[in-house]
Amino acid sequence: MPQKSYTITTPIYYINDKPHIGHAYTTIIADIFTRYHRMKGEDAFFLTGTDENSQGSLDAALKSGETDIQRFIDAQSALWRSTWDSLDILYTDFIRTTEERHKQGVKKFFLAVHEKGDIYKGTYTGLYCTGCEAFVRESDLVNGNCPNHPCPPQEIKEENYFFKLTSYRDRLLEHIDAHPDFIQPVSRRNEIRNYIEHHMEDISISRQSAKWGIPIPIDESQVIYVWFDALINYLTGVGYGWNDELFGKHWPADMHVVGKDIIKFHCALWPAMLMAAGLPLPKRVFAHGFFTIDGHKMGKSMGNAIDPVALAQSYGNDVLRYFLAREIPFGSDGDFSFSRLKERYTADLAKGLGNFTSRVATMASREYNSASPVSLDSEAKDAIGECWNEWTHAMEEYHPDEALSEVWNLISFGDKYIEQQKPWALSKSDKARYTAVIQTLVEVLRHISVMVYPFMPKTAEKIWEQLGIGEQQRSLTCEQSRTISSVPIEHITKSESLFPPLP
């Protein structure tokens, strides 16, 4: 049978600033689910990239003193790409909106919508926030400022091209009602449904005054509005306009991961655009919440934006990944706290997973090496089976924090099993029972290492090295790995602590 495909995306990020911890959270979560679906044996395609055709990009270049705009954008995009590389993000492709393949796809898409009769010319008068790269209503302002950026929007009056967004109101509502998983979490779905039904208006999709962007194919005196351009990256990144075979395999996307501040674009404008172009809609849009830092709103103006690369260099990539996935329920608002990070490090990682791994590897490496089939105690077999069931359910329902909680329940079981069985005593009084207990503990640790892999890949690999698990065994699918006794342990070694004490 052909390999099942799975496609997940992050937003493409503005290049007018450097990545912060909020961007890293979005990208790490997408990476976790990519690794999970690859563990299932699926052809998982992970798309991320940079949004470069905005007024903000032009303004940032001019502010920097760079006269060659494209050179500035190239350097900024490279910074984002190197950030994800340094954080071990396994993206399949990195799309840039100044690439020729994207420009071709955008023109193709625009012409398809235009030929449908859903683009018309009109005059736009209103407010525009360059921080959001979006038009805002006066009723949305907070003390005269954009609700998402501490600055007043610009007042614009232009002759623009408009997309007939309101003509898709009924179809959008019907789709949302017929597909309850299309917008997640439920609170976001209710918010978008209300917006579409009561507040959605036709949207200007070109800028007459903008000096940077993709020209309108039917009128090169204007450029395409950045959001109408940027959303199409989800198509061009998987081959639209340049690779039909790739596009046929990886569209529609299984999930767009976005922040809740851009959900109207992704759950109202984007599906309507796709309807107009005659293309299938993504299966799910999942909007996570906002970050605070130690209880305070995060932002450049607040001076509290956290560099994820520096944080990973201090604590390790896996620690950062674990903390973000465990501490902040996916879909909810969350708070990043250095004190909580240190607490999680000590309690969950050093004293939890790290200590259990050390105890098992130490006991097994001293007196036990066996390539024989594993015979587990029934209570351990039940605990492993229950953990796999709950872990898989949590991952399928996009609850990474709950999946990790189940793994730590299994670690707790392993610790209690050691205390109950007292293998140090059995090694002197009952060698056969001692061997069975050690076999059981090694197998519990193996299952833990597999389930922890999408979250902490380097940590899982270190455990596999200690357990003597080779490359072929590591490539087993989830279903194969969960089969009891599927991987005989040939050689066990003890190495350095996975999570040494913090300085």
Image (tube, rainbow, N blue to C red):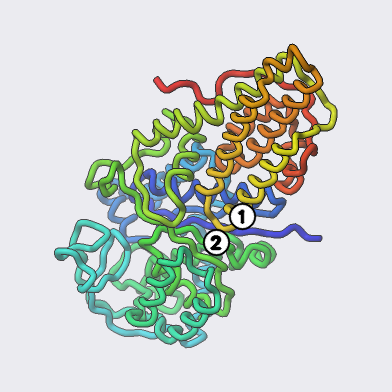
Residue farthest top in this picture: 428
Q: Of the residues shown, which amino acid type is indicated by label 1? A: His
Residue 470 x/y as whole percent:
75, 31
Q: Residue at x 27, y 59 (%)?
A: 148
**The quarter of the displayed image where residue 293 is located:** top left
Q: Of the residues shown, which amino acid type is indicated by label 2? A: Met
Q: Residue at x 58, y 18 (%)?
A: 496
**According to the image, label 2 marks what residue?**
255
Residue 167 is marked as: none
Mark 2, mark 1: which one is toward the viewer? 1
Residue 164 x/y as whole percent:
41, 84
**The quarter of the displayed image where residue 189 is located:** bottom left
Tell me: residue 296, above or below residue 272: above
Marks 2/1: CA distance?
17 Å
Residue farthest left in this picture: 143
Q: Is disc 2 surrounded by few (<14), some (14 to 19) or many (20+) residues within 10 Å?
A: many
**According to the image, label 1 marks what residue?**
393
Residue 186 x/y as whole percent:
45, 67
Residue 154 x/y as whole percent:
20, 67
Q: Is residue 134 left or right of residue 84?
A: left
